[in-house]
Image (tube, grey):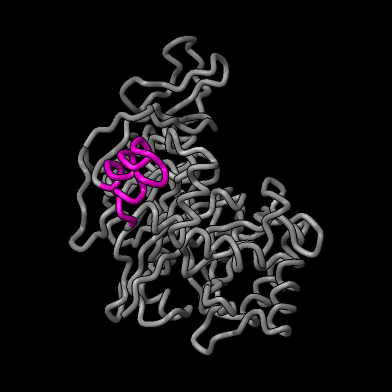
Amino acid sequence: MQKIYADLHIHIGAAGGKPVKITASRQLDLKTVLYRDAREKGLDVVGVIDCACTNVLAEIETMLKEGQLQALPAGGFLARNGVLLIAGAEIESREGFHSLIYVPGLEQLKTIHKYLRTRVRNMSLSTQKARVSIGELINLSRLTEGIFCPAHAFTPYKGIYGYWTDKIRPRLGADTDQIFALELGLSADTFMADMLKETRGYTYVSNSDAHSSANIAREYNLLRMGEKNFTELKWALQNKEGRKVIANFGMDPLLGKYHRSYCNDCKLITSEQPPVKVCPTCGNPNMVKGVMDRIVEIRDYEEPHHPTGRPPYYYRVPLRALPGAGPKTIEKLKKYFDNEIEILERADIQVIAKLGGEVVARQIEQMRSGRMTISPGGGGYYGKVTKDHFKC
């Protein structure tokens, strides 16, 4: 068995010289993700969720012909540097929330492209609203032998719980049985999600939802897999054949830009006990509901009820977001250590102190064992780390 680091929600900014994800960096293309960013971050597996877009699909075909990618018999595409590409699509259904479908190979990817091109206005762009129901998307994932996963499930912006429903099973019935993975999103963690009874059977994944190279692997997963391929990933998410998610590594949800409710009128991120539905300052009832507020609103338990075997969730802050970790300090650390995950997880603290200074070393050391003190985010504004203060 191997220990595999994976970030399964990465966007492409451009392909073939044309935009793909409008809000993503144009410098973020498929080759850059595979051959530079994945290695610099320390990822073994990357899930790119714009692969059904016309130009990205064409780029994958070109890379296969040129030998830059190899289609594996058990699914997935292996780059020459050993990074595994899991191809996927992020789709907005008629219900108004986002879902991820990962598929094993090129033919299945073409099936999704063919299916969507009569239901989507512009197949060149990512995360388009499709004239298709959630049930039809689940059937599509089954047809393509894929993995279906609700994206950023609790966010007010297009999350299945945050936007659409209190409970999934009453809305989807038997189709719910096809869902075995749930993406937490940047504003939620295992402790919050396990306050819902219904989530007990889901495997949680923590992914970056990166729109730029800098944000890749701001959240990631540690998996136990026999080999690097699609089938092994699917088994890990199904907790099958000894494969599993060993741990989730994610931003403290307080850092998430939708963690607490927000008033657009007076620009206030609320601090009152959740759920806050009306602005305590101006009385505005049209709040941007926070993830914490939403979970408290729909929860079944006041405290998390973790099922047996639930993987641990470790709080992490991207290296560049640590107070005192400026560009020069980060460059020194990256030149010495193999990658960013190595620095955050395993690097010797004394060596970090020698290269990057005592402040950064102390922050990384304490982050590995506790939680930083953070001013929470909300309404589209990220939370901020309070310099050099931690709580364990």
In the displayed structure, would residue 133 be above or below residue 189?
Answer: below
In the displayed structure, would residue 165 be above or below residue 202?
Answer: above
Question: Quick one: which residue is furthest to the front in this view?
Answer: 354
Where, quadrant-wise, is the N terminus in this rendering?
A: bottom left
Residue 258 position, x and y percent, is 47, 35
Question: Quick one: which residue is furthest to the right in this view?
Answer: 17
Asked whether 356 falls inside the magenta stretch, the response is yes
Question: Quick one: which residue is furthest to the top in this view?
Answer: 282
Residue 171 position, x and y percent, is 44, 54
Residue 141 position, x and y percent, is 53, 72
- Magenta stretch prevailing secondary structure: helix
Is residue 244 found left or right of 137 in the rendered image?
left
Q: Quadrant of residue 3?
A: bottom left
Q: Which residues are magenta?
A: 347-368
User: Which residue shows up at 54% across the image and 45% down it?
Assistant: 158
Residue 112 position, x and y percent, is 65, 72
Is residue 43 found left or right of 36 in the rendered image?
left
Q: Quadrant of residue 239?
A: bottom left
In the displayed structure, would residue 307 be above or below residue 297?
Answer: below
- Residue placed most toward the observer, 202 or 31: 31
User: Which residue shows up at 26% across the image and 55% down it?
Assistant: 312
Asked whether 143 falls inside the magenta stretch, the response is no
